[in-house]
Amino acid sequence: MSALRARSARIMIDGEKLSQELATLATFSDARPPAVTRIVFSDADLEARGYVKGLCTDAGLVVREDAVGNTFARWSGERPEEAAVGTGSHIDAIPNAGRFDGTVGVLGGLEAIRALKRSGFAPQRPIELLIFTSEEPTRFGIGCLGSRLLSGSRDASVDEKLKDKGGLSLGDMRKAAGFTGDLKQVPLSRGDYEGFVELHIEQGPLLEREQRDIGVVTAIAAPASLRISVEGQGGHAGGVVMADRRDALCAASEIILAVESAAKSSGSLDTVATTGVCDVFPSAVNSIPSRVHLEIDLRDIEEQRRESVFRSMGRSCQEIAERRSINIRTEILNADAPGECAAHIVEAIERACRANQFRFQRLVSRAYHDSLFMSRIAPTGMIFIPCRGGVSHRPDEYASPEAISRGTLILAQTLAELASR
Ligand code: GLV
Ligand code: MN
Ligand code: MN
């Protein structure tokens, strides 16, 4: 057994079992290996949930699910009525993703709990593993759906308002997946959790470059996303002369470049913008595009700066619309504030790193995570581990078993400290 033992306690991580479970989880996928595609409420997602719930039950945890499919697996501890210490992440995966994003925090969280149990540790307060629904925005255009609802950052009206590309509402989809409860029951209260800690791959190159075992996250960037619908006039690719055209794709192309240039001219490397979706209608080679649907992701560590990039994009859209006689409609799906990690959790993670003589550094998360929303209702921290080349959201995403075990060990020790308070 490749096991990693804590220097100061009898906590031992079973790295081999964890790697096997990550490999098995990756088989629930709509893509050919090594790619993983697991869109929320797809069969692959539901089967993967079944697999993880089974592992939780095998570990002696009590499992419950809420109306949007967030899953909670609880170890009650000595004082079950006390506020719990939470850990966890997501198992949904964007199209053509890898196997480590989110899953390391879920299965690593489970292994941390199992390791604490094996060590004979008796938590004073409950420790709970959370598997959040739809951290990825693929289906509904909005990320961190489950944790957003848990934190009360969006209300139950999303049941009707959020629709996938096929026009199915969140309500329709979740009920078909077996989550039939009332969305109004989903929000948690401040005080339900004593603390929350998420383990995740870094999704950036810093830790590998600096040869650190662990990244201790201090803040999570402010993400925003928008949909832009561009409407021009279709027509025959031969019959309509250039001067008479109102080509929606040509207008959309200008918008995409304007988005890139607005982010580049923000004056900071921390501003990033991506047009990740561009659907063209009718998408026929001999037909002038009449409609284009764009989805744009915009992030910054500073909310103010992100807002000014937003405004600059808006001005460009207006100018393009007027000049090309095109209709451009912009819908902001979310514009979230950045999240701060709690100082006492940052320090607890660092204490665990020192106790094990792991090399660590503080950093900010440029990617968003369910922790962004958990930080609104509970003191929150995040543990990052290096991933090869900083690569993520790609099939070649990779974190070594050793790196995963180290992160899991730090998580276990941090949970133990928080659950003893
Ligand atoms: C999460 O997957 C993100 O896009 O940051
Ligand atoms: Mn992701
Ligand atoms: Mn993730």
Image: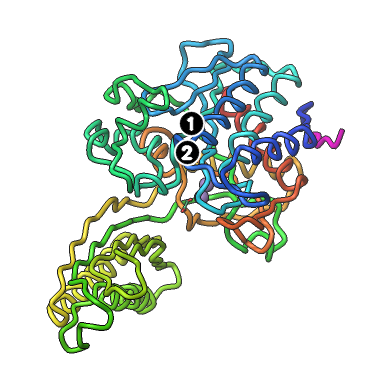
Residue at 54% from the left image edge and 34% from the top image edge: 88
Image quadrant for the N terminus?
top right
The residue where tag 1 is placed is 195
Q: Quick check: marks 1 and 2 in contact, CB under 8 Å?
A: yes
- Point out residue 108 in the picture as x, y percentages from the top left corner: 65, 35
Who's the residue at 55% across and 57% down the image?
363
Q: Residue 5: x and y, percent?
A: 81, 34
* Residue kind at label 1, given as amino acid type: Gly
Q: Which residue shows up at 26% across the image and 36% down it?
A: 158
Q: Quadrant of residue 290?
A: bottom left
Q: Is residue 78 above or below residue 401?
A: above
Say above or below: 277 vs 326.
above
Q: Position of residue 124 (x, y in %)?
A: 58, 16
Query: Does residue 377 sit above or below 114 in this rendering?
Result: below
- Along the line of sight, which residue is nearer the eye, 344 or 376? 376
Q: Nearer the viewer, residue 97 or 90?
A: 97
Give the magenta range: 1-6
Q: Is residue 7 visible?
A: no
- Give the CA distance from mark 1 to mark 2: 6 Å
Q: Reading the chain from its start, which is encountered first: label 1 or label 2?
A: 1
On screen, residue 156 versus residue 122, left or right, reads left
Percent position of residue 359, x then y:
72, 53
The image quadrant of residue 382 is: top right
* Labelled disc at residue 380: 2
- Name the foreground residue: 347 vs 49: 49
